[in-house]
Amino acid sequence: MAKDYAKATAVAGRPAAPSALRQFSVLLRKDLTQEFRTKEMLVSMVVYAVLVIIVLGVALSFAKPSQEYLEVCGGLLWVLIVFTSLLGLNKSFSREKENGCLEGLLLAPVDRGAIFLAKAVSNLIFILLVEVLAVPLFWFFFASFATPAETAWLSVVPLLVGSVGIAGVGTLLSTITVNTRGKDVMLALLFVPVVFPLLYACVSATTATLLGGEVFAATWTVSLVLAAGYDVIMILAAWVLYDFVVTA
Amino acid sequence: MDPILAEIYSTILPSAPYVIAAYALIWVALLVYVLMIMRGTKKATAQIALLEEEVQEKLGKDE
Amino acid sequence: MAKEKKPPVLPEAGQWPDKVAPVALVAGAVLTTIGFLLTFLWVPPVVGASVNGAALIGDSMVTQQLLLSQKIFYFHMPVALVSFIALVFAAYYGIRFLATRNARFDACSKVAMEISLLFIIMTMITGEMWTRFEWGVWWTWEPRLTTYLILMLIVIAYFILRNAVDEPERCSVYAAVVSIVALIDVPICFMITRLIPSSVHPVVLREGGMTADMGICLAVVLVGMLAVGFALYRARFGQVRLGQRVEALKDALEEN
């Protein structure tokens, strides 16, 4: 099938358009190279994460260290992740806009789905990279409050599932808000309510891993299944709708 | 009054303000929206009057 | 493409729905009034906590407290349903817009979203009043409340977004996309907040099961509210279209 297409286009005197997979990998590599050259976004995200941790530290500075602290801890971790990813999502598209890169991309015969996937995956990679630094930092600062259950390491799973959803939905929404006035606030306004269900499920799963025992048995599976369901549905929707948004 | 009856009816009076407020506020919300529609219509009508004037002026110039 | 597709009929002020709208308005007013009267005069009050003993009221023995606060429910639930139906229409017209790129559908979508916001606000008000009395707090993270808060925030963000985009075409596309995302997001939100047991707050269950009386009363109010919503939608749509036509005339006049 692909060969026939290549032949047909070759006959017409044009080089065959690269496959969607190749377009995707080229776009993804472009994003990663661009970022790793300047590290502008990653650095600002990590610094921002540290600042959020400091604010959380102040907020907790009058709390007595106790096991009950574990009930809020998962939620606080997600506060950190949501705000840090918001910053990253805002940056990821404003850069494309400033360089006029997006217009160039749209002029080229690139599959819109490939643009979405490349952008979402690059956002996901950045969010995960920041999490790799920020989450241990979070434990470093707050470990003195309480010892989590043995299942705590499993909180990697909700972190992963949550990041996938945040990157997928965030890519769609940040493409919308990059063209609006007051885009930073606009992204937060759209992003937080839309991602709320995912956040709720992920906080529940994370808290379950920290508390372990009965709570873990009761909520872990259902929370993760729901979070994964949100991911699938919302990313499919974002993928379908992306074409309209990016060409508008 | 019979104490049992008093107990049976005990929540009615305290809840009355909330029930009344709920129903009243529904109507207030509907009313505000209707007023918004009316204001928009009024604006459009005023602009139509302006347009009419302008058209009259243009016609006068052409002649 | 053997056959030329018939161009879709564009919604416009003054078409057949506008002939139905005044009837709907009257029907809505009458039905909601009947519903209101039924609520307070006809449907027997719901009973709550037991009291120590029994008393004879009319010709029946009553052993539990009579609740007046539950009367809010007869308007609360229909209003909430109408707000969700309006949201479905907003998303439907959003899809029509994305398929046809005709600004008329965008106007429909926007007006439907406004109706949705209006009914969401009414839902929130009635819900708040009930919550405040029954649970003694203004706010609690109960699935229905949470879902409606999130829905309200998305719809408000929708209007802020519309105001923040300058190009009309782009504004319409973004608005359509957000309306579709909102429609997908809200049921998920309800499911997730409902299915995940919250360990911190007690799960609050509204007493299930409705008597036939309650169902009839609810149905009357629901039909009435739907009619009111439809009439408001047409009125607003006519007004928005009038404004658009005036603007178009203005532009045409300036060009000459």
Image (cartoon, rainbow, N blue to C red):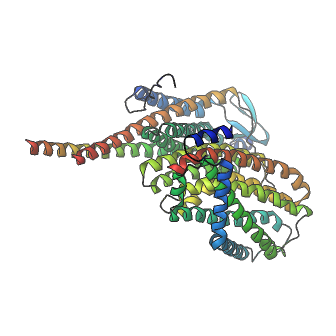
Give the residue drawn at x 71%, y 27%.
C59
Classify A30 as above or below C146: below
Q: Which of C150 and A63 is in front in this view?
A: C150
In the image, residue A222 lies at what x, y percent? 82, 48
Q: Nearer the viewer, residue C202 or A214?
A: A214
Q: Nearer the viewer, residue C61 or C106?
A: C106
Give the residue drawn at x 84%, y 52%.
A220
Q: In this view, does C137 lie to the left or right of A189?
A: right
Q: Tell which residue pokes out farthest to the top in this image.
A: C3
In the image, residue A205 lies at what x, y percent? 81, 56
In the image, residue A88 lies at what x, y percent? 63, 65
Give the residue drawn at x 76%, y 55%.
A161
Residue C61 placement: quadrant: top right
Residue B17 appears in the picture as rendered: no
Name the quarter where the N terminus of chain A is drawn.
top right
Residue C119 placement: quadrant: top right
Residue C86 appears in the picture as rendered: yes
Classify A38 as above or below C90: below
Q: Tell which residue pokes out farthest to the left in this image.
A: B63
Q: Is residue A169 left or right of residue A213?
A: left
Count of numbered circles in the view: 0
Give the residue drawn at x 67%, y 61%.
A29
Classify A124 as above or below A63: above
In the image, residue A150 lies at what x, y percent? 92, 63
